[in-house]
Amino acid sequence: MKKLVTAPHGLHGSLTVPGDKSISHRAVMLGSISQGKTVIHHFLAGDDCLSTLAAFNAMGVKSERDGETVIIYGNGIDALKEPAQPLDMGNSGTTTRLLMGILAGRDFETRLFGDASLQKRPMKRVSEPLSHLGARIELTDNGTLPATIHGQKLHGTHYQMQVASAQVKSALIFAALQADTPSTIIEKLPTRNHTEIMLNQFGANIETATDQKTIRVVPKPELTGQTVEVPGDISSAAFFLTAGAIVANSRIRLERVNLNPTRTGIITVLQKMGADLQIEALPTDGEPLGNITIATSQLKPIQIEAEDIPAVIDELPLVALLAACADGTSSIRGAEELRVKETDRIQTVVAELRKLGVEVEELTDGMIIKGRRQWAINNDQLDSYGDHRIGMMDAVAALKADRPLQLANADAVSVSYPGFFQDLERLLGGDLA
Ligand code: S3P
């Protein structure tokens, strides 16, 4: 059990959050399938991205890591070797699903397995669409890991996606790169586009139509190693943005945060709820980047619908927490994807908010939350249930409590933010006026 801190005097100061998780994964993957050296700065050395790095090492890719700097020595996709052992995906859905797309077109067989949470998560959503390119992937009868990927020669396709998922889209793009003819992938809703942006930086030809949903992949590009500056992860910054908004007397600046519009749903939500927030855009060669300053304010309720979801998918637990402090009733709908994250995040968020004394109605596709200025905490024992984002949401909620609360399974935070509790402590002693 970890004792969580309260913040009776608010949070103050500036923080550079760790590198973006999605971009860190992709930088390792693209470096590993390109020719030459890739240098990654501000790499997120969390458990998930280390699972990706270890998987490519096991397929013969040489790399060096010194803290947040990683160098990958790529020899092209054809140099990947059959791993001697099944590959351990740990807790990482992104590693698993994106790798399926890369491995589907190799000339060897790979087995993938993961931890108890990952082995419950749906993988047919990847294997089925990949089969349209000729991929052959075996899953359990429940459509879960362990998986066996029988590498095949792949063919171009025209595929309409059934789920709004950047992981499924990225797997399809990786497979389409290895096909004999071009492919078109049509998304259900636009999702994060880091794969497309970074592949083009490495030399591929991926075109996104003006509808932001139709993606054309030209196969067999020559990919060349690059330098990648990973921006701060808005999904990690979001914990402090939320804390800054809801904990009285706070003012926090988050520096060099990725502002790719496919990821900034939390900023839109905060603005709509009336948060006191400023954004300072910074010059960049790559993805949009900026500093975000937030100060405490009384929030208004919000209504979230299906089309809002992809840009805020990982921050929905925090949206629920913001709603729990707002003046009025908020709703999150069209968010059934939350049920298949590291935990069923509809169930786990509802359970945690109820411990705070917040009235929440659980819906199949979301929740209805009655905000209140003062919670009536009825259970001091919070729980991450092994889910990093739920653990950090709990720690943010606990800042507002009138006594220290406890967190079970706190070490789950290392999946995406190993230094989270230290950074939080720093803001408790910070001095941004
Ligand atoms: C991710 C995509 C999202 C997100 C996950 C990371 C990615 O998952 O929730 O944390 O890096 O592509 P889905 O594609 O399943 O929505």
Image (spheres, rainbow, N blue to C red):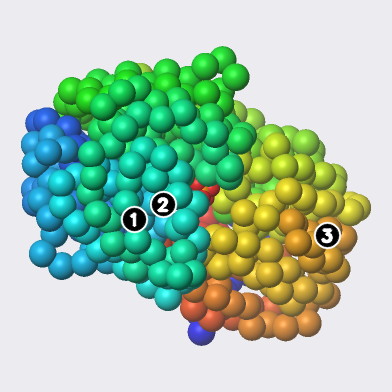
Q: Quadrant of the C terminus?
A: top right
Residue found at x 49% / y 52%: 125
Q: CA distance from mark 3 to mark 1?
A: 41 Å
Q: Residues within 10 Å of mark 3 (few under 14, many from 20)?
A: many
Graded by Cα atoms within 10 Å as few (under 14), some (14 to 19) or many (20 or more), the crowding at tag 2 reads many
| Foreground of the two, 336 or 152 | 152
Displayed quadrant of residue 304: top right
Residue at disc 1, secondary structure: strand
Q: Position of residue 133 (x, y in %)?
A: 36, 38
Q: Which mark is residue 127?
A: 2
For the point 53% across and 44% down, the residue is 165
Circle 3 — which element? strand
- Looking at this rendering, what residue extends furthest in the right direction? 328
The amino acid beneath tag 3 is: Ile
**Closer to the camera, 392 or 349?**
349
Type of amino acid under label 1: Ile
Q: What whole-number distance in Å separates the C-alpha atoms at marks 3 and 2? A: 36 Å
Q: Are discs 1 and 2 less than 8 Å apart at CB?
A: yes
Q: Residues within 10 Å of mark 1 (few under 14, many from 20)?
A: many
Amino acid identity at mark 2 = Ser
In the rendered view, does 278 fall on the left or right side of 254? right
Q: Earlier in the sequence, mark 3 or mark 1?
A: 1
**Which residue in the protein does label 1 denote?**
137
* Image depth: mark 3 or mark 2 in front: 2
Residue 266 visible in this rendered orientation of the protein? no
Helix, strand or loop for disc 2: helix
Q: Earlier in the sequence, mark 1 or mark 2?
A: 2
CB under 8 Å between callouts 3 and 1?
A: no
Can see residue 355? yes
The label shown at residue 369 is: 3
